[in-house]
Amino acid sequence: MDENNQHLRRLLEQTDVAFKALMQEPNSSDLNAAYDNAKAELDRYIVSLRNSLAQRHQNLTNRER
């Protein structure tokens, strides 16, 4: 889980840095694209974590039956 936490922190930091850069130059298409890409990568990772946790929960539930 620690590896997941490190990856999540890295993605959050990447998104935060991209957002702050975009706030400095809101009309920059490159910075908009960088922020959108960072958000998308973070969103994909969160979906992956949720799916993994749901699968783990399902496996535990099935074992208890």
Image (cartoon, rainbow, N blue to C red):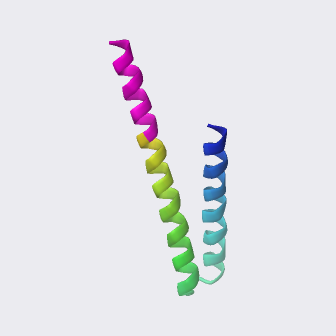
Identify the image quadrant of residue 17.
bottom right
Height in image: 50 above or below 44?
Answer: above
Q: Is residue 6 above or below residue 30?
A: above
Residue 14 is situated, as x and y percent measured from the top left of the image, at 64, 64
The answer to whether 5 appears left or right of 61 in the picture is right
Stretch in magenta: 52-65
Residue 38 sits inside the magenta stretch: no
Q: Please report the residue visible at 62 percent of the width from the left and 71 percent of the height from the top.
A: 18
Residue 59 colored in magenta in the image: yes
Q: Is residue 30 above or below residue 21?
A: below
| Residue occupying image coordinates x 39% and y 25% | 59
Q: Residue at x 51, y 64 (%)?
A: 39
The N terminus - image quarter: top right
Q: Farthest residue toward the top?
A: 65
Q: Position of residue 46 (x, y in %)?
A: 49, 50
Count the labels in the image. Answer: 0
Helix, strand or loop: magenta stretch: helix
* Nearest the eye: 15 or 44: 44
Q: x%, y% of residue 40?
A: 48, 64
Work out which quarter of the rendered image holds the C terminus and state it.
Answer: top left
- The vertical placement of 55 against 62, above or below, is below
Q: Residue at x 40, y 34 (%)?
A: 55
